[in-house]
Amino acid sequence: MTTDSTILRHPFVSFLDAVCRGCGQVMFQNNPITGFLFFAGIFYNSVTLGVCAVLGTMASTLTASLLGADKDCIKAGLYGFNGTLAGIALPFYFAFDPVLLVYVIVNGAFSTIIMASLMRFLSKWGVPALTAPFVLGTWLLMFGVYRFAVLTPGALIAPAVPDLGTAVALGGLAASALFEGVAKGVGEVMFQDNVVTGIVFVVAILINSRISAVFAVLGSLVGLLTGLALGVGETPLRLGLYGYNSVLCAIALGGVFYFLTWKSVLYALGCMILGSIATASISVFLSPIGMPALTWPFIIVTWFFLFAGSLFKNLKEVPAEKCGTPEHNLRLEEAGAVLPS
């Protein structure tokens, strides 16, 4: 026990622990093994995206440490997860070039600055920043790409007129496509268009929280079915593009920020459905300028649901300083460690 504690106190090991937790916190999992498996799943799909994920997380975590951010927040990975996404997004949407690695580091470090700003602003209402630092920072760096000769935008961010595509009739999606869409919906939270990676992500979440793993799958399924019911084309459904924002909505409201009850589950379900609808809305809004929606649909919808929650007496918020896994939060409530709001 003493030896293990000594190892964990070593600065380098402690930093790696924070980096892995940072990756895990992309889906609200404060667990280094979960984060490590997330990294492994990304590397399985793409070595380039894996390297940039690690680089972005390290940049954001190191920036927080050098600037003297709260040590407990750094240790819990709260300054790392936006860096993870910031690192992956750039090589996903830009043609890869060694110069891009510098841009990845800048984006990761910038996400920490934005994170601290939003934490200070939102803390008065007890609302988390979520992945807003990643989105705002990445958008800012992306908008400049058409002015920078050393960076080449990829086809995914070319300005385009929104196209409906070929809609799928309700009930017309094959079981294989449904499975693929649900698995990829979890993977697409971190831009991974890979069924195996999506499954690895679910297993990684399961290690830390069975409830969150269930909500992750449920969120992807609800997002896909919402898109299907509204007549979305088969290709984006199969790719999980209507599921990933709903995955994050599901985990966030499924026992993390609210104590789990049947009423909070229904509330979370509404957030999942709106997360899928917002994915379409924001994508249509941004497509003429070639910018991706990223996780903004999840952010804006979840913020609405969190800000509104304090006025609904049938929902019980988990105090920010006590937030943990849904299982942990339920134990707190059962032990009477949280006073009624």
Image (cartoon, helix red, strand yellow):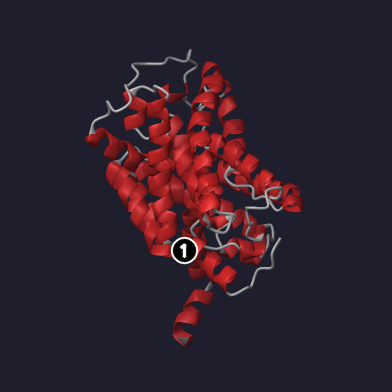
Name the quadrant of the N terminus: bottom left
**Badge 1 local density, few (<14 within 10 Å), some, or many (20+)?**
many
Residue 49, image x and y in percent? Answer: 39, 42
How many labels were placed on the picture? 1
- When asked about the image quadrant of residue 240, the answer is top left
Which residue occupies the foreground of this view, 274 or 315? 315
Residue drawn at the location 26% of the way across and 33% of the way down: 177
Residue 55, image x and y in percent? Answer: 48, 49
Q: Residue furthest top?
A: 161
Residue 188, image x and y in percent? Answer: 40, 39
User: Left of 126 or right of it: where is 28?
Assistant: left
Which residue occupies the foreground of this view, 141 or 98? 141
Residue type of the residue flagged with mark 1 = Asn
Mark 1 — residue? 31
- Residue 191 visible in image: no
Residue drawn at the location 63% of the way across and 53% of the way down: 314
- The answer to whether 112 is drawn above or below residue 100 in the figure is below
